[in-house]
Amino acid sequence: MASAAFAVVQLIPKLTLTETMGADAFLLLSLWCLLGFLFYMRTVARAKSTAYSGVSAAGVAMFALLLYSALMWLGRRLMAAESVQVVRETLKYEGSLMLFVIFIALGVLLYIERVLRKKQEDLLSGYQDDRMIERGDNEE
């Protein structure tokens, strides 16, 4: 429920009279999402569970939140720039940081998807092996 309220406040312009989050808060949110994403990667890689439904959707949603917060951070920093020279400097350094964070998160997302695909293939091959053994025992 809290995340739905966050989304409504952020996505509907001028819902509140004051700015809800500043540029630095968006930077911290994107870095927090990146740390959470790394923890999520570790958790998925170590999981022994056979149920993986919803894991891909959760990873994509987490990446979308990270992307949104990183873009909002850079956008707010650019809107606060006072001259073209400041905009250029902001894009040069902070834009590079934003791209770095986004590409790390994209790499983590692709790694998670690869790990999940491998686990599902292993699970499926084990299931097929069990079925073949059952058929072989029934035919004798």
Image (cartoon, rainbow, N blue to C red):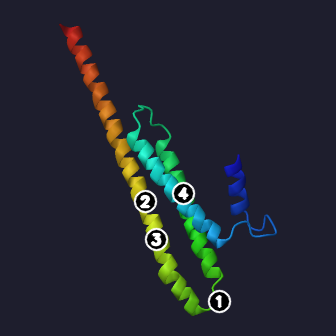
- Where disc 3 sits, the SS reads helix
Mark 2 Cα-neighbour bin, 10 Å: few <14, some 14–19, many ≥20? some
Q: Which mark is residue 99?
A: 3
Which one is in front in this view, the residue at disc 4 or the one at disc 3? 4
- Outermost residue on the right side: it is 17
Q: Amino acid at mark 1?
A: Glu
Disc 4 on helix, strand or loop?
A: helix
Which residue lies under the disc numbered 2?
106
Q: Secondary structure at mark 1?
A: loop
**Residue at horizontal 43%, vertical 59%?**
106
* 122 vs 59: above or below: above
Q: Pick whichever of labels 4 and 2 is earlier in the sequence.
A: 4
Q: Is residue 135 above or below residue 65?
A: above
Q: Residues within 10 Å of mark 3 (few under 14, many from 20)?
A: some
Which residue lies under the disc numbered 4? Answer: 33
Label 3 – label 1 distance at C-alpha: 23 Å
Secondary-structure class at tag 2 = helix
Could you tell me residue 52's position as x and y percent? 45, 37
Circle 1 is placed at which residue position?
Answer: 82
Q: Residue at the location (35% across, 37% down)?
A: 120
Residue sitting at 64 percent across and 72 percent down? 23
Q: How crowded is the residue under tag 1: few (<14 C-alpha within 10 Å), some, or many (20+)?
A: few
